[in-house]
Image (spheres, helix red, strand yellow):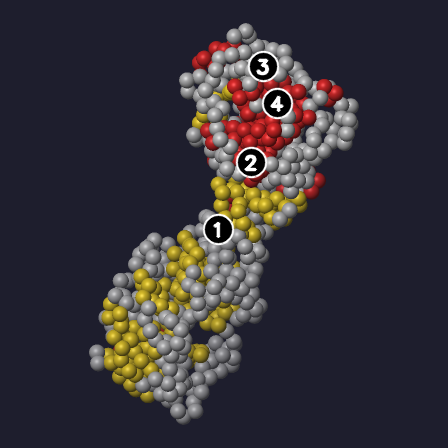
Amino acid sequence: MYHHGVRRPWSAAHPGSRPGAGCRAVIAVSVSLLLLVAEPAAGVGSQASQPPPVATPGTASDPTTTVPPPVEPTSSPRPPHSAAEVETAAAATVRAFGRQPYMDVLAAAAAEAAGRRAGGCALSDARLAGVMLAITFTEAGPLASSTVAPSPMTLSRWDGSAALYSFGSTATAYRTAFWHPGVGLWQFDHPWPNTASERIDTASAAALAAQVIAQRFCTWTSSTGLSQFAYSVRPWHGCDAATGAGEACRAIFLNHFAANGAGLADDGLVGFTLQDGVTRRGGTQGRTCRIVGQAATVACLYVDPSAAQGSRAWTSGGFSPNPISSPFYVVRDGTAERRYWLGEDSGYAIDITASATIGSNPRSTLTWASGERLCDLSTLRGACELRAPSWKRWRYDQVNGTYAPLVGDFDGNGRSDIFWYAPGTAGDSLWLTRGTGVPPLKLAPRVDGRYAPLVGDFDGNGIDDIFWYGAGGAADGLWLGAGGGSFVASGQAVAGTYEPVVGDFDGDARDDIFWYATVDDGSSPEQLWLSGTQGFVVSPRAVRDGLAPFVGDFNGDGTADIFWYGPGGAADGLWFGRPGGAFLSSSRSVGGVYEPLVGDFDGNGRDDVLWYARGFAADWLWTAAAGGAFQTGPVTINGTYRSVVGDISGNGLDDIVWYAAGEAGDAVWLGAAGGTFRADADVRLANRYVPLVGSFDSSTGLDIFWYAAGSVSDGLWFG
């Protein structure tokens, strides 16, 4: 508690003081203020345990310097405070301060002062804390306010060196990617080996400030040419005033330090009103990030000046001609401090990175680069693997294992489920989707065997079934979905080697199977299996060899058709599905080697075909018209990609996701009326995935589960 008594000032009465002014301040606030009774915060002692180098004032040209100046922290350059400002500071009797930062100051001061006293230096906890607090008002501001506390996030704007601007030019087009050299309540700049993260966090910053001040206080001699107070605060330019070195800070210190007796333990602090809304990190957010190209995650700090707690005067446009930075991330990467500006924060078309060796002067060591280099794993922003378009939500998931996954509505609830089939004897799993934000119900069915499974609603009950096809003479089976993720099994016999295609070829709301043999060796005749109320009705169908069939509804009649594509110069054909399994056949001519992509890209209710030629060959779009005709037109893709087709945007037209392993540019093309596409979003899909398209939530658009075999992270685009 506070004891009334006589102050022990550093020197003569400070400028502008009035007899009794200090006592009136103490009486006014003594009931509500937290005084100097605190235990050291955890970890503070360890950070302060190694004393800094002995500090001497000035620079190498300073006549008061008797030895070469050591490495010590300094604040960013700023002009001295005017006499009027010092007068204002001296008159203030109550100042606001964040509660958490205040407790960090007390803890750091107590830990540091105790060590100094053990070494014979007469420094009280309160005196050291008082000096530390005084500095923050001159460096971070405001000088005198009982309602606005200094912000731990404060970023210096006094220095306009060109090197601090992005790419080292004041004429840069990216002005708000600006490296603020001085950071935090004590505006630490260089050459101390800490990053902006440690300078903002008042637990670590207070420990450093306590070390520096105590070292200078305890090594002061009159030969320095400065008062002991001025020498103690010499590294902080904000303490200087037109009335003398350190005077701005001394005026504030004298209003809050109370020497309450002969013993050092009797000293105290008065005149601070503590605010819970100003926390240790000042409104910054600690997050987890990953630097592109590095496997391990790193701690990162997200600094958004608009979210600063406490004083925000330094964020206003008129505060300085130098910019205020867009939100940025701070990462300690080995010996480098890196700051990252994401385009989604800055509004620029590029991401920007700046790096400097920790402890160096950034004005001479900064390097700048553009490109995607950081992923914020906490909020899934930036250069994150599996990054979805901005209009799609996404999250990471983890399957862990090697599977041949199947997608279907296996419980009949209208949402897609995933059957994780592990060929052979490994364990299988069935994930039943329960709803947005609800974990799937995980079942453990048992398959045992190697199959080429086919998914379809073969009995027409609204629940998807699985046909377990064993190529050649292997046993086959049919699992009919019975609801709730259960199945009713029955034996089947295909007896042949086929490339089957599934679709409702007769329009009876039951899926059928066309068993196509790419090579006619006499043992695998083509067959059409039409689903009926009593199982499959089998009929032979003859198709020539060497084709690559695919299914779509190309005339929009609700019945599945088969496009018989002959890669290269082979003849092509199109079979339109009809009731009873009778197909209407017509010839087509494609001419070339393509990867056909099927979807209703123009929204007219008929499936179109995009003929994608990998690399830089010509690509074509066939848009389906009435009567089964196509209108053809060129499209340009240029590149080697994998693709996913589906209405993921929910606008009723099918879209295409183009992705390639590695750092190639990935993109989303949105379908549009008239057979055009709109490149809408950049996405990031560098790994190899098996994309699983389905409706995994209640939104209108389709979702994509990106499965990567093994232990690679998987993810879901949804919403």
- Pick the front one: 97 or 562: 97
Read off the residue under disc 1.
377
Q: Residue furthest left?
A: 533
Read off the residue under disc 4.
122
Give the mark nearest the N terminus, 1 or 4.
4
Q: Is residue 552 visible?
A: yes
Q: Residues within 10 Å of mark 4 (few under 14, many from 20)?
A: some
Q: Residue at x 72, y 19 (%)?
A: 222
Q: Position of residue 244 (x, y in %)?
A: 67, 17
**Label placed on residue 45:** 2
| Left or right of 271 on screen, residue 121 | right
Which kind of residue does numbered mark 1 sit on? Leu
Numbered disc in front, either 3 or 1: 3
Numbered disc in front, either 1 or 4: 4
Numbered disc in front, either 4 or 3: 4
Give the mark nearest the N terminus, 1 or 2.
2
**Label placed on residue 8:** 3
Q: Residue at x 50, y 77 (%)?
A: 591
* Alpha carbons under labels 4 and 3: distance apart: 13 Å
Which kind of residue does numbered mark 3 sit on? Arg
* Alpha carbons under labels 1 and 4: distance apart: 49 Å
Q: Residue at x 57, y 48 (%)?
A: 351
* Alpha carbons under labels 2 and 3: distance apart: 27 Å
* Alpha carbons under labels 4 and 2: distance apart: 19 Å
Give the mark nearest the N terminus, 4 or 3.
3
Q: Residues within 10 Å of mark 1 (few under 14, many from 20)?
A: many
Give the mark nearest the N terminus, 4 or 2.
2
**Label placed on residue 282:** none
Numbered disc in front, either 1 or 2: 2
Kindly state the secondary structure of the residue where label 1 is placed: loop
Kindly state the secondary structure of the residue where label 3 is placed: loop
